[in-house]
Amino acid sequence: MKTHAVRLYGENQLKLDEFELPTMGDDEILVKVISDSICMSTYKATKLGKKHKRVPNDCDVNPIVIGHEFAGIIKKVGKKWAHQFKEGDKFAIQPALNYKGSMDSPGYSFRWYGGDMTYAIIPNEVMEINCLINYKGDAFFEASLAEPMSCVIGAFHATYHTIPSQYTHVMDIKEHGALAILGGAGPMGLGAIDYAIHRDHKPRLLVITDLDHDRLKRASEVFTVEEAAQHGVELHYVNPADHDDVEAYLRSLNGGLGYDDVMVFVPVKALCEQGDRLLGKDGTLNFFAGPTDDQFTANINLYNVHYGATKVIGSTGGNTDDLLESLELTAQNRIRPGSMITHIGGLDSVVETVLNYPSIPGGKKMIYTHHRMPLTALEDLHTLVDLNPKYQTLYDIVKAENFIWTLEAERYLLKDIMEDPDAS
């Protein structure tokens, strides 16, 4: 079977290829990829090439397929897995395999298995460790976004606090505590805001900072202060540029006290150090943003570590339980992953999008792999009418939802525009 895929050959060397997949084994599964959400981690892998820990050293001769936030339809099941998976079922994936200590992962390490391709062969180890998920939902994009949402969920679960005079770690953010997310108005920040407000284990105070006025404005429109209050959360959006002493202002929002939890969503030294200074007693700093510089450092106050029991942790990715929690909360309409999406595009837009990812504004970029279209902001879909008049209707659909990508929008795209209609 032929497939189209975006493959990595080395540092900043991406190419959209057409090639023949090998014959599927009895312990493998053939799938049709429908959607893939582009991640900053893919840009980092592309920038580093072989220097990335998950990318094979021979990718120049055996290129790997990029993309790890994907979903689709099962097309053929090997004998070994016929009892568990069926042709025609939808799937989601957990890319954090950690199979027998290996760092191999879809989107970084495999030749026939990744998100930015039309058809893929899923290797045996993925099923062995339950990282292929039977997806019962309707929207492919929500299954794709379960992976980035699982990273956010994992960050909350990885955070911990202590019981005075006991050597006991209480996992998760401080319930009814004060949480600050620094650099938190980007796509992952939106996911974190959504989760913090709508989960059961909530903070009392949630403060989001960001230097980008437009991102803050968009975040405040998607998740309003009023909605947060209805869920028992006092929400503030803060642009540090608006304050002479932003740290004093942030403390004033918490009655002059430090924060129980601070999450850093941008890998900037000054932001990490600010987060450390904002911690209160037994406070935890979670360095969530992954840097590309393996020598990235920042200063922390060790005096407070000793006497104030402050802690610095990092979390990357989520586990399968986190992904399943994301899917469950989405199915219950408690979280809205579609709010993270600001652009859609076809497989032919992936190379340019990944190579220029940091300079493209907005949130998540959702790719529909059987579609051909330039990467386009939801607010600009009407500009594609010359390519196909049906983009006007698609624009009208998302405009009616305040430019949030929805199941209705996806179904319209898959049914009326895709070159491969049976994908819907």
Image (spheres, rainbow, N blue to C red):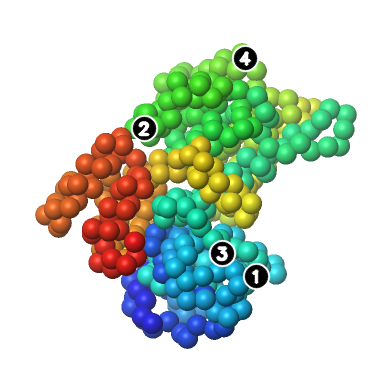
Residue at the disc numbered 2: 218
User: How far separated are the C-alphas under marks 4 and 2?
Assistant: 28 Å
The mark total stands at 4
Residue kind at label 3, given as amino acid type:
Leu
Q: Earlier in the sequence, mark 4 or mark 2?
A: 2
Indicate the quadrant where residue 263 lies. Answer: top right
Which percent across, then down, holds residue 394? 23, 48
Which percent across, then down, holds residue 25? 54, 83
Left or right of 112: which side holds 395? left
What secondary structure is found at the residue carrying circle 1? helix
Going by the picture, which residue comes out furthest to the bottom? 23
Residue at the disc numbered 4: 256
User: How far separated are the C-alphas under marks 1 and 2?
Assistant: 41 Å
Indicate the quadrant where residue 119 lies. Answer: bottom left
Residue sitting at 59 percent across and 63 percent down? 131
Question: Pointer 3 and pointer 2: residues touching (CB < 8 Å)?
Answer: no
Residue sitting at 35 percent across and 73 percent down? 4
Q: Earlier in the sequence, mark 1 or mark 4?
A: 1
Crowd band around label 3 with a 10 angstrom C-alpha radius: few (<14), some (14–19), many (20+) = many
